[in-house]
Image (spheres, grey):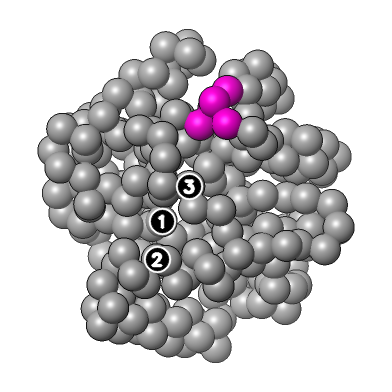
Amino acid sequence: MNNSWPKPTVLAYHEVLPGRPKSRYTVGCDQFDAHLRFILGCTADGAMRPQITFDDGHQSNVDHALSLLERYGIKATFFLTAGLIENRNNFMRWSQVRELIQCGHSIGAHGWSHRFLPQCDNNDLRHELDFTKAHLEDKLGQPITDVSMPGGRVDSRVLRFASEAQYRSVYLSNPWVYEKPHPHLQVIGRAMIRSSIGLGRLGGLVRQTPCTRGIIRMEQVIRASAQFIFGDSQYHRVWTALANRNNLHSSLK
Ligand SMILES: [Zn+2]
């Protein structure tokens, strides 16, 4: 593992849809287009080009984001909630996942049901990590080595199970990971991209400016305090309502 710092920022997108975004974690097509043009220019001005990832497996990633990625020649990693593929409206079908692979994009796992992994017992955790990995590999005919944590939730037990499931990289929902929390896993931070993030904030994330790092740190402290005070489940209910986001956490297993 390369422990050198700084590392390129990893960006995490969710839905990409035309028109005005209706939820906090949806970005507009025009906004995404502007982000990609900004990212293309990063190497020209000396900044490290960020890596792009998508969580959940939304069909909009294929319908709207893929053509923009292709236009600019940018490759991304798509983390799939395996139990939702071909199983729920507005999520990808397997043929679309294969189309992403044929275009040179990478596929990772995002659990089976989008349950928060620290809340799973050991059997369910193996289902979310081991079974999901085997299922994706069976459907796609290629190794799956990367996993992103649903809701960014992780603890030492989840990391141990992810390592035992033979994942090599674990992606989180905080932009920067300064320590190495597991001896055999590469644990990678990500910046969650919201509909409100314009090019100024994106530039701060990509360049990892002290101001942006301070804002992120403050947001982390506020979030951790709220989770501690209200409990993670209650915090998530409020967060889901505020973000106007479908609760993926609720159904499939
Ligand atoms: Zn997710």
For mark 3, give the secondary structure: helix
Q: Is ligand 1 closer than 8 angstroms to the Cβ of mark 3?
A: yes
Residue highlighted by disc 3:
248
Disc number lying in front (2 or 1) = 2
Instruction: Give the Cα separation between the discs numbered 2 and 3.
Output: 11 Å
Q: Is ligand 1 closer than 8 angstroms to the Cβ of mark 2?
A: no
Q: Position of residue 117 (x, y in %)?
A: 27, 48
Residue at x 66%, y 77% (from the top left corner): 201
> Disc 2 vs disc 1: Cβ atoms closer than 8 Å?
yes
Residue at x 43%, y 60% (from the top left corner): 173
Q: Position of residue 252 (x, y in %)?
A: 41, 34
Q: Which segment is the magenta one?
A: 84-88
What secondary structure predominates along the stretch shown in magenta? Answer: loop
Q: Is residue 81 magenta?
A: no
Residue highlighted by disc 1:
151
Residue highlighted by disc 2:
236
For mark 2, give the secondary structure: helix
